[in-house]
Image: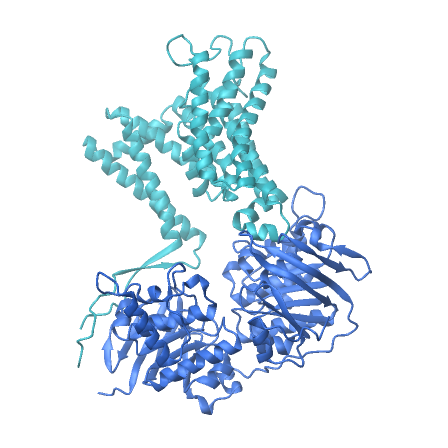
Amino acid sequence: MNNEYAIELKNVTKRFGEIIANDNVNLNVKKGEILSILGENGSGKTTLMNMLSGIYFPDSGQIYVDGREVTIRSPKDSFNLGSGMSHQHFKLINVLTAAENIIWGLPGAERIKMNQIVGEVNALCDRYGFDLNPTQKIYDRSVSQKQTVEIIKVLYRGADVLILDEPTAVLTPQETQKLFNVLRNMRKAGKSIIIITHKLNEVLELSDRVSVLRKGQYIGTVPTREATVESLTEMMVGEKINLAIDRSEPGKPELRLDVRNLTCKNREGISVLKKVSFTAFSGEILGIAGIAGSGQKELLEAVAGLEDIESGEILYHAPDGSIEKLSEMAAAEIRDLKISLAFVPEDRLGMGLVGSMDLTDNMMLRSYTEGKHFFTNRKKPKALAERVVDKLAVSTPSVETPVSKLSGGNVQKVLLGREIASSPTVLMVAYPVRGLDINSSYTIYKLLNAQKEKGASVLCVGEDLDVLLELCDRILVLSGGIVTGIVDARTSTKEELGLMMTGSKVGGQKHA
Amino acid sequence: MLKQNEITVKEPLFRVIKRSNISMPKAWFIRIAAAALSLIVCAFVVMSITGDNPLSVYLGIVDGAIGSKRRIWVTVRETLVLLIIAVGLAPAFRMRFWNIGAEGQVLMGGAAAAAIMIYFGQSLPNGILLIIIFTASILAGLIWGLLPAVFKAYFDTNETLFTLMLNYVAMQIVTFCIVFWEKPAGSNTVGIINAANRGGWLPSLFGIDYGWNIVLVLAMTIGMYIYMRYTKHGYEIAVVGESQNTAKYVGINVKKVIIRTMMISGAICGLAGAIIVSGASHTISTSTGGGRGFTAIIVAWMAKFNPFAMILVSGFLVFMQQGAIQIASQYGLNENASDIITGIILFFLIGCEFFITYKVELNRNRKEAH
C-alpha cells in the first residue's frame, strides 16, 4: 500500500446545477509537505477543500486518506480521518475564551478540567511556536490571534492534515511571516498543510508544490522551485499577462480635499476615526491602507456624506476655486450641489447597486431625480448603460439583465462605469478588485489610472500592499481609526507599511 | 482492500438545486399545473366527505361562483374588494414594509364611512355625502397607515407587530361605535344603514349595480401600476425595498419614502373600507374586513406586486371561495368546508413557487456502498 500521500483525490467532480465547480480534479498531498492550491476566484479551490472537510459531497470520484478509500459525509468524519480546515471567515464564539472555543464540540468528561486543557493548549503553542493566551476571551483579540485559535482548534483535535483557506487575507506582512514560521514548524513535525491562496509571492515563499485550478479544471501541479510568478499566472489565467501597472507622474496637482481633525463615532459611541487629517490632490492616486476595520470604510463614507461626523471638517476645493464644507452636508445635498464626487463602496450589490434591478435602472440611481417631471425617464440611463457595456466590455446578455446575475468583475465594471460617467473630480473606491480575476483587476487599475490622468483626485482603499505600492502616488495608513503615516508610494516598502498598520507611527513627517 | 474507516452513509435520493433561470412559459406551466393539482385534491377531499363524484363537485364550484346572474355579481364584487386591498398593500410590500394591518386600515375606512352615513345620511344630498364619505375613509385608513410608518422611520419599531396590533385597536373602536349605532336596540348589530333613503349608498352606474365599484377599483389598479413602474416615487420605493443602504448612498430620504408610501397604502385600504360599506354591505361590524386584509397579502405576493396579475389572482381565489360556499351548502357541510378548500388551493399555489425557484433532481450517480 502506497502511504506516501496523506490525502489523494482522484477524478473528483462536483456540480451545482448546471455549473461544474470541480471537473475531474486530481490532487495529492504528501506527508510533511506544504501544498498551495492556486486559482482565481471561482476556480473551485474552496469547493474542493469543502469536500475534503465534509461540507460538500462529491458527485463522483474517490478520496483516499493514508492510501485508504474513504467516504466523508460530515465535518465530523473529516476530523475522525485526521484532517481539519481553518476557514476564511472565523467560526469562533466571541464571549468564550480561546481554550473554551478549542474544546467546544469535543466529547469529554462531564466535568471539564480547564487547567488541564489550558496546559495542553500551551504545550501545542510551544511546540509549533504560536503566541497565544488560552484564557483570553475571543472578543479581546486581534484578527491574527483569532486565526491562531482557529488553527490550534484543528491541531488540538489531532489533525495531521491542515487546510487553510486564504489565511493571509487579513494579516499584515509581519503577521504573515509569523504564521509562515509556524507552518514551517508544523511541516517539520510531519503534518501536511494545504493552503488556498491567490497571492503568488506567498506561494513561492512557503510551499513545496503548487496545484493550479482554472474554472473548475485541474491544470497541473508543479514543484515550487521550478515556478515563477509569470509561469504560475499563465497557468492560472491560461494566457500570458503583463503584470506591470503603469504609473504616470501626477501633473499639475491642485488641492481637492482637505480633511481636518475628522472624528467619527459608531452607533455604540466608540470612535472609529480619531482626528484624521489629510489632503488629496487632483491628478494623483492616494492609497489608503490598514488592517480590515481600521476606519477605511468610515473615512470614505464620511466624505460621501453617509457617516455622522462628531467633529472636524471636510473641505472640498472645486476646480473653479470655490470651497464647500462637505462635513455639513448629507449625501443628497452633495448630489444637489452638483459636486462631482464619485464613490465605489466596498459592498457593491448592497450599497452601490441594486442587485435585482437591471443595468438601466442601476444607471438611473445617480440621475433619476433629474428634471422636474413626476415620471422617470429611462432614455438617458439606457444610453449610458449601453455605453458602459460597450466601453468597458461588460459581458451581459443585455442591459435588461439584473446586475446580480453578472459575475463579480462585471458588476464592478458596471458600478465603476456609472461612477466615472459623471467625470468626477474626486473618485473614491473601496477594495476595487476584491473578488475579481486578474484580467478584470488590471482593467480596473487602468480605469483608475485613466481617471488620474484626466485630473481626478482618486482615493483608493486597498488590501494588497504590493498593488497599492505600484498603483498609488501616496499611501495613507490607518490603524484603529488613527492616521499612523502618509508616505510616498515610490520610496516606501511593504514592511514599513506593515509596521504602521499595527500602530507604530512613522513616516508622518514626509508629507503634511 | 482495507475499508474499516469507511463511513457508509448513502447520498440522498433527491437533490434540491437552485434554478439560475426559468423561462416564463415554464413558470406559468408550473403554476397552472399546481392549480390543477389543487382542484384534484379538493375534489378528492370533498368526495371522501360526501361520496359524490368529482365532476358534480366541480360543477358545484362553478355553479356557486358564476351559476346565476346574482352569483356572478357577488363574485365580481368580492373580487373587487380583495383586489383593491391587494393594490393598496403592493407599494408597502414592495418597500419590504411588512404591512399586515390592512384589516385594520380597511375597518377604520369602513367605520368612517358608516359614521358619515349614520350622522349625515338624512340631511345631505347624496353626491356631497359620497364625497365626504370617501374623503373620511381615505383619511382614516391613511392615519392607520401613517402611525406605524412614523414609528418605523423615527424609532425603528417592528412594523409587523405594530400593524398587527393596530388591527385589534380598530376592532375595539368599531365595537365601541356599535354601542351607539346599534339598530334595532339590543341587537348588538348596526343593521342596514339608511335602508329607506339609500343615503350614502354608491348608486348604480350605466345601469350596473356595482358600476362605481368597478370603475374605482380598476382606476386604482391601473394608477398603481403606473405609479410603481413609471414614477420617481415608484423607483424610490423599489430602491428602499431592495436595500436601504443603497437608498442612503444615492441620497434618497428613506424616512420620507417610508412615511409617504405607507400613507398611500393605508389610504387605499381605507378607500376599500368605503367601497365595502358604501358600495356593498351598507353596514359595519368587526368582521367587515372579513380576513381579506390578510388574504390580500397572499394576492399581492403571488402576483409579484404586479397590479394586473392581481386581478387574475384575486379573481381565482374569490371564484374558488364562492364555489366552496356553494359546495358546503349543497352537501350540507358547515362553513369550515370552504375554508378547507381555500386552504388546499393556497397550499398548492404558494408551494409551487418552490418549484419555480428550485429544481429537484434525482441523484443520477448515487454512490453505492460497496
Palette colour of chain B: cyan
On screen, residue B109 versus residue A460, left or right, reads left
Residue drawn where x is 47% and y is 67% of the image:
A142
Q: Image quarter for residue A280?
A: bottom right
Answer above or below: position of A240 versus A319. Answer: below
Q: Is residue A389 visible?
A: no
For the residue pair B320 and A358, the one nearer the viewer reads as A358
Numbered-mark total: 0
Q: Is residue A169 visible?
A: yes
Residue at the front extreme, as displayed: A115
Give the colour in which the image draws chain A: blue
Q: Nearer the viewer, residue A65 or B264?
A: A65
Location of the C terminus of chain B (image quadrant): bottom left
Q: Is residue A372 left or right of residue B360?
A: right
Q: The N terminus of chain B appears in which quarter of the rendering?
A: bottom left
- Residue that extends furthest to the right in the rendered view of this protein: A321
Residue B110 percent across, percent down from the top left = 49, 22
Q: Position of residue A458 (x, y in %)?
A: 68, 67
> In the displayed structure, does residue B184 sit left or right of residue A462?
left
Q: Residue at x 34, y 45 (%)?
A: B34
Q: Nearer the viewer, residue B99 or A388?
A: B99
Q: Relative to residue A378, is residue A317 depicted above or below?
A: below
Percent position of residue A323, x then y: 79, 57
How far across and down, in percent of the image, does residue B323 sit?
A: 33, 30
